[in-house]
Image (cartoon, rainbow, N blue to C red):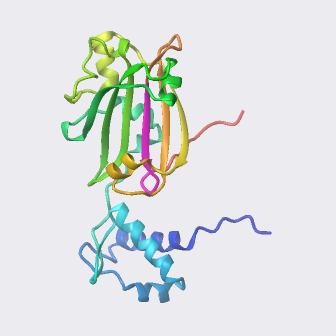
């Protein structure tokens, strides 16, 4: 029995069209072959072709116009390489006012209370914001702070943190991040996440905690990453 992995048919269609755009065979503004032509060329069903085109449109490679066809937009910008460590990226990135969704004092949900080591519904600061990849929302991020951590800082204010949360907490309260603990799951987005992402497609959900050198939890993060925009890669030694 062969152990070779054959990618899904729609993924092969996606890869072929992406390569043609990279090579300049399909230039920005060009109309792609019709669905019927692609079905014949690749020897797949129409559903497979439609799924491939929908994915390419979501990723920013093409634009689909009802009744006219699919048109090349060009090669989208590469996702940030450091997204393989979403918790660290989230804590270090500078903020922009247009990406701040809300900053509220709320009762801690059960899963956040467990991460922070506090009682459920204990008041915490929830700082919700968006990250963007080109014109698309590439992540919905919520940063959760115990009140004693937020006290005397600007993390409970709606103004953007110019140098990011990690730098702000270190500068204002001399708190130093020592390590992150992250848990990754594949799931469907919540109703709010789907509205912010503009899609109900599956997401990679990250639950993370930030610790100081003593192991104390300084903050928690929940991050929702669209599955079609993100992939995780790691390199490690075998001992």
Residue 76, given in percent of the width and then of the height, sits at 32, 59
Q: Nearer the viewer, residue 170 or 117?
A: 117
Relative vertical location of residue 202 with respect to residue 37 in this rendering, above or below = above
Residue 40: percent from left, percent from top: 49, 89
Q: Is residue 130 magenta-colored?
A: no
* Residue furthest out toward the right: 1
Residue 200: where, in percent of width, then height?
A: 42, 57
Q: Which residue corresponds to the image point at 24% horizontal and 27% vertical from the top-left?
A: 161
* Residue in front for this viewpoint, 43 or 21: 43
Quadrant into which the C terminus falls: top right
Q: Quadrant of residue 169?
A: top left
Magenta-drawn segment = 220-230
Tell me how many marks there are: 0
**Quadrant assignment, res 125:** top left
Q: Position of residue 41 (x, y in %)?
A: 48, 87
- The answer to whether residue 170 is above or below residue 101 is above
Give 124 or 42, whichever is nearer the viewer.
124
Q: Quadrant of the N terminus?
A: bottom right
Q: Main secondary structure of the magenta part?
A: strand
Residue 135 located left or right of residue 176? left
> In percent of the image, x 45 and y 49: which residue is there?
189
**Residue 146, quarter of the rendered image:** top left
Residue under the image location 35 percent in, 26 percent down? 106
Q: Is residue 30 above or below residue 142?
A: below
Residue 229 on the magenta span: yes
């Amino acid at each position: 029995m062969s152990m070779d992995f054959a990618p899904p048919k729609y993924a092969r269609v996606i890869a072929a069209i992406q390569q043609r755009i990279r090579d300049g065979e399909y230039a920005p503004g060009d109309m792609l072959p019709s669905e019927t032509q692609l079905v014949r060329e690749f020897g797949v069903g129409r559903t497979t072709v439609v799924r491939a085109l929908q994915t390419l449109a979501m990723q920013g490679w093409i634009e689909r116009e009802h009744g006219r066809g699919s048109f090349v937009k060009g090669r989208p910008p590469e996702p940030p390489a450091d997204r393989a460590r979403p918790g660290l990226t989230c804590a270090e990135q500078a903020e922009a006012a247009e990406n701040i969704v809300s900053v509220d004092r709320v009762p801690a949900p059960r899963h956040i209370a467990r991460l922070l080591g506090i009682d459920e519904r204990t008041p915490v600061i929830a700082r919700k914001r968006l990250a963007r990849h080109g014109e698309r929302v590439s992540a919905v991020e919520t940063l959760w702070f115990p009140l004693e951590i937020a006290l005397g800082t600007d993390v409970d204010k709606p103004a953007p943190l110019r140098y990011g949360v990690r730098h702000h907490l270190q500068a204002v309260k001399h708190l130093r991040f020592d390590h992150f603990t992250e848990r990754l799951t594949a799931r469907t987005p919540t109703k709010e996440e789907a509205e912010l992402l503009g899609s109900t497609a599956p997401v990679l959900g990250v639950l993370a905690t930030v610790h100081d050198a003593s192991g104390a939890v300084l903050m928690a993060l929940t991050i929702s990453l669209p599955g079609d925009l993100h992939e995780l890669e790691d390199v490690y030694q075998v001992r």
